[in-house]
Image (cartoon, rainbow, N blue to C red):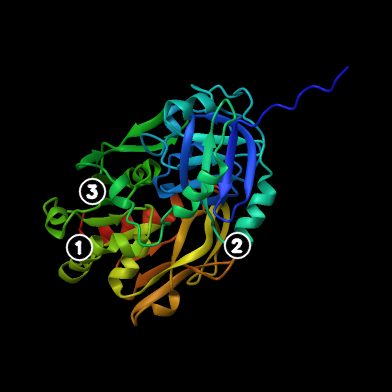
Amino acid sequence: MPAPAHPRPTACLVLADGSIFYGTGFGATGETVAELCFNTAMTGYQEIMTDPSYAGQIVTFTFPHIGNVGTNPEDDETGDPVAAGMVVKWMPTDPSSWRNVQPLSNWLAARGRIAIGGIDTRRLTRAIRQQGAPHAALAHDPEGNFDVEALVARARGFAGLEGMDLAKDVTCAQSYRWNEMRWAWPKGHAEQTQAKHKVVAVDYGAKRNILRCLASAGCEVTVLPATATYEDIMAHQPDGVFLSNGPGDPAATGAYAVPMIRDVLDKTDLPVFGICLGHQMLALALGAQTTKMSHGHHGANHPVKDRDTGKVEITSMNHGFAVDAQTLPEGVIETHVSLFDGSNCGIRVDGRPVWSVQHHPEASPGPQDSYYLFERFAEAMAARVPA
């Protein structure tokens, strides 16, 4: 008998250097172009795809079992996926979790996100590590028809994330209140009804679980758009200001965010707490600089050392830019460093309740190594405003 015909590839991943990876498509059909990164987390693929910090990026998952627990609305970090696409080694199997509402492929298709399976993700990850995060085009066509030259041209034509302000694309359109707390068995997400502190959270691409952690720490949270001014913030008479995570080049977002943060620092004594892009925004406002990393930090196994205590925390990270510690001005102290590469992961202002971290303390690998940061924020507000 003749050998069975090899199935025709239905998806194609093309890098700007001309490298081509064929595989099996799932999710939506069509084409997309973005920066290609990899994430080493073993869990949380739905949270990763809906993390606004991944805007402008296609995510390669190094862990092969992606999609095996399906998807459900409780695990969304924002309304819809923000990452441009997904690359996996093995095609998703049928969901095997009691929490599943929709299989991953259907969930992606309904939300217009392209995915490719059957890829040698180890080879792809090595290429990203060695050469830096490449620009890539991803196409899914059930008929297997690909114009590879056009895809290469699209990848090479991608402008890249440097100089790109993506916070404006993922921020909220208008202000809103948030009172949902962290998930807890068996009730799920309870509401914060006894808040002690009023917090304004500036949304550069905020994850829902960060807002839940603020609510669980006793905060009444009002979320404002990324373009909020000093006057917008002070109109809510907050006890503290939170600067959220988000995507893109911090220097580009800083064009409008930094003046507001400087006003808060110069005109008030409010506690200020920043995470991820919010950390970078605070550093810029204090006079430091940021740089583009080769391939960034993306995963849930990143060891970070607290230089004040010597404690090492296992953290979740997602950033392609970093604060240059060599540019921190006098009076701004480096508090956390990555034990992978020594890059900056936290700062504080000497003598003031103003600090920020690069990692995502709400994501809780470890399992809850960094939750204390939200409690510290609440304590700073309590110290300023007597109960």
* Amino acid type for the residue under numbered disc 3: Pro
Residue at numbered disc 3:
225
Side of 35 relative to 173 (left or right): right
Whether pointer 2 and pointer 3 mark residues with C-beta atoms closer than 8 Å, the reply is no
User: Looking at the image, which residue is at 49% across and 29% down?
Assistant: 29
* Amino acid type for the residue under numbered disc 2: Gln
Side of 158 relative to 203 (left or right): right
Mark 2 or mark 1: which comes first in sequence? 2
Give the image quarter of residue 258: bottom left
Mark 3 crowdedness (10 Å alpha carbons): few <14, some 14-19, many ≥20: many
User: Looking at the image, which residue is at 60% across and 49% down?
Assistant: 40
| Quadrant where the image shows the N terminus | top right
Residue 376, relative to residue 170: is it above or below? below
Mark 2 crowdedness (10 Å alpha carbons): few <14, some 14-19, many ≥20: few
Residue at numbered disc 2:
131
Residue 59 in the image, given as x and y percentages of width and height: 53, 45
Rounded to the nearest angstrom, the CA distance separating label 2 from label 1 is: 37 Å
Nearer the observer, 349 or 34: 34
Side of 323 relative to 223 (left or right): right
Residue 115 in the image, given as x and y percentages of width and height: 54, 35
Residue at numbered disc 1:
260
* Amino acid type for the residue under numbered disc 1: Met
Is residue 257 visible in this depiction of the protein?
yes
Camera-side mark, 2 or 3: 2
